[in-house]
Amino acid sequence: MNIGILGLGTVGGGVVNVLAKNQAEIMRRTGVQIQVTHAAVRDINQPRICPTKGIEFTQAPFEIVNNDSIDIVLELMGGTTLAKELVKTAIKNGKHVITANKALIATHGNELLALAKDNNTHLLFEAAVAGGIPILKSLEQGLSANQIEMVAGIINGTGNFILTEMRDKGRDFADVLKEAQELGYAEADPTFDVEGIDAAHKLAILAAIAFGCELQFDKVSTQGISQISGEDVAFATELGYSIKHLGIAKKLNGKIQMRVHPTLIPKTRLLANVDGVMNAVLIKGNAVGPTLYYGAGAGAEATASAVIADLVDVIKDTLSHNVLGWQSFEAIPYQNQDDIESIFYLRLLATDKPGVLADITAIFANHNISVEAVVQKQIDAQDNAHIAIITNQVKTSNINAVVAAIQKHDSIQEEVKIIHVETLD
Amino acid sequence: MNIGILGLGTVGGGVVNVLAKNQAEIMRRTGVQIQVTHAAVRDINQPRICPTKGIEFTQAPFEIVNNDSIDIVLELMGGTTLAKELVKTAIKNGKHVITANKALIATHGNELLALAKDNNTHLLFEAAVAGGIPILKSLEQGLSANQIEMVAGIINGTGNFILTEMRDKGRDFADVLKEAQELGYAEADPTFDVEGIDAAHKLAILAAIAFGCELQFDKVSTQGISQISGEDVAFATELGYSIKHLGIAKKLNGKIQMRVHPTLIPKTRLLANVDGVMNAVLIKGNAVGPTLYYGAGAGAEATASAVIADLVDVIKDTLSHNVLGWQSFEAIPYQNQDDIESIFYLRLLATDKPGVLADITAIFANHNISVEAVVQKQIDAQDNAHIAIITNQVKTSNINAVVAAIQKHDSIQEEVKIIHVETLD
């Protein structure tokens, strides 16, 4: 089996390094010697983080995907334009493709997977979701007896690092983001990470594999963490929660929900204790109950671990030609956003006048929403009351209505903050 | 594919139930309708927890394994004598076998796996370790790029339930054990659970798959939790640890360690927060770093989830005929018990005389062992000092020597308690 790599940067270099250092062990497992024979790079003269002996270099990536001697292509260059054309060409030429490119799969996966099926080749992407955690294989194989009811994951390490620092050190968002960029966790343009787009890509992939339906990235409702303030973090702690940026996919009463948003989860849950850049995914199956998978969501060698696991699967030739682990898809309707039920955390800044809390709680009562917990913090210099409220489980439309009503109360000083709460039980 | 079940109790009944309720979903995944056609039971007239329509019953289990119309045998009866003969006969007759029987695999797995390989059939046992958690598949497939350095797991739910209750409610061992028996978690004879034999069976299986070597159950050093007192639990909490009953397999400098024992682990680790009857396994790979897998370690439907996942793998015919996921084994030497290095917790009961602590710490210094932490608790009515000590990392032979020396000190009132500490970092 000859292997060609598109892109020999951090991930590509990591793959070559891990293949080199674990050669004997991988050989014992597979019975096959794996050797990268070709690599396409942007600049052939740039220094590499891995040994390059035995690898033929080119700056023309189409040479790789059109090369008859290559059996497997590793797409590790990123992007969705050139990468897509290269993957399509590789598949049409009968090559198996392994990629770590979540954006490519989330946005063009349906087309590419169909093409792979038509050409009797494999398109695998374990590394695209939660880095080194073998989460897609677990869903496809280990949990194959289950109807999956929920997937809830911390699937963006940068966001989790920022929220962990905010909670543990009382730092604010902008300050930690700057450090994350300096540490190389966050890109120069951090939008994909902090606004939840990266997590939404991964969630769309997880949901399709979990439920056996088409990839529908455009259906994911996405909210980032840039609006989380130190005050929210402190209130959450006081109320017994930790704020995590979760990707949640649920199948409830025959309908699917997919949403990425900051979420208060009870401190005692394992997910609440997944800190720093680590990732974890909680899966609920109707037979197995809750299971959780934890590990590094990024990094050269952790990602390489997942890429090579796919490679071993292809080389051992033990895969059936299905799509996302399914023989057939179901068209499962999406839950209307307004009908999604959740517990909510609301934060209010109100003038501290007698009767304000009574007025506000009356508004909740009028909307038939219970106040499960309320904390009012010390009044600031401006004589304002800082109030955090946890509701019971209500429809999104209902919470929006109550917030609109509260917002009109003349004591309210700023926009009411709304954050989802998930008990994960 | 016709499927025969040996044993239609909790697990067997769970398998039939899950197959029934998830029929459509499993069909969409596999493209195959799975139907249990035959069952061997001890008493044909006993009531069943599952639908029995379409299942032909017998009280003669050899009829199942000798029936030419049956392709796959599920051994869910337990025991290692009759079960072994039945599995051997099934394999010799060319049938695939799936079992949840950890004792059978741990003690006779080498022979049975070799027989399966010779007969070109599969012998699978995902359900034998950590119930519904797809831990064997993750090791064999998801982490196939790695050299595994460590496996550390909470792999006995009963033991974990007892330790959790002792910690959270200050109850003592015997009291919680009695409740666990009443709840059906622990057997009437709880030896296998609380003395670590069940965990040792599972650890032997995990280690063989992790390292690619023969199953060697007799090499596992095993210590139970019956000696853990409320005082140890309280001291551990005070020192920032939680006591868990861990199965630990490490490959260090080309040698393997396998041990089951109570272990102090830092409270901040995810494993320390795995409570009640839940199981979790931490795996360290040299590429992926630490990953953790959490879920229900027992229960009818969780175990059925793992049995059926194996069944799907066999039916999809996507497995290569290897042994424990390896093409070839390595004979890896075992670490001499005396040479195993660990941090230790020691608990002493000493007469409270001036100079006792000075004497004891001098004995540590003489053995070149550092005292990393020490707590001395309020003196009891007998004027005794209760002392807990955490050491640095030392050889087992060295800790045994220091304990022997301390034991001779005339202030020491009872046997010094020794418990392993693992930082898991």
Image (spheres, coloured by chain):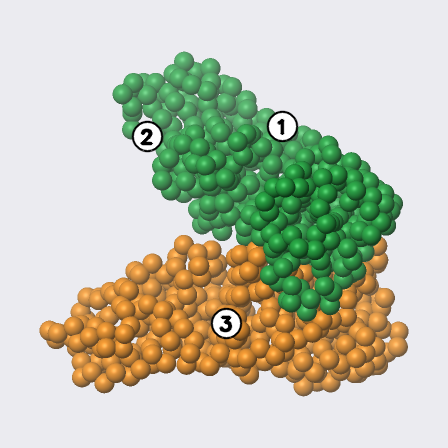
Chain colours: A green, B orange
Mark 3: few, some, or many residues within 10 Å (few <14, many ≥20)? few
Number of disc labels: 3
Quadrant location, the N terminus of chain B: bottom right
Pointer 2: residues within 10 angstroms few (<14), some, or many (20+)? Answer: few
Query: Measured from the top left, where is residue B60 in percent x and y?
Result: 79, 83
The amino acid type found where label 2 is placed reads: Lys
**Residue in view at x 43 percent, y 42 percent:** A164
Residue located beneath label 2 in the image: A377
Looking at the image, do the residues carrying marks 2 and 1 touch, with CB atoms under 8 Å apart?
no
Are dots 1 and 3 on a single chain?
A: no
Q: From the viewer's perspective, tell me whether residue B97 is left or right of residue B70.
A: left
Other-residue count near label 1 (Cα within 10 Å), few / some / many at <14 / 14–19 / ≥20: few
- Residue at image location 75% in from the left, 40% down from the top: A61
Residue A282 as seen in the image, left or right of residue B66: left
**Which chain does the residue under circle 3 lie in?**
B
Name the secondary structure under disc 2: strand
**Taking B375 as reference, is A35 left or right?**
right
Q: Residue A242: which quarter of the image?
A: top left
Give the amino acid at mark 1: Asp
Residue where numbered disc 1 is placed: A338
Tell me the mark number nearer the camera, choosing from 3 and 2: 3
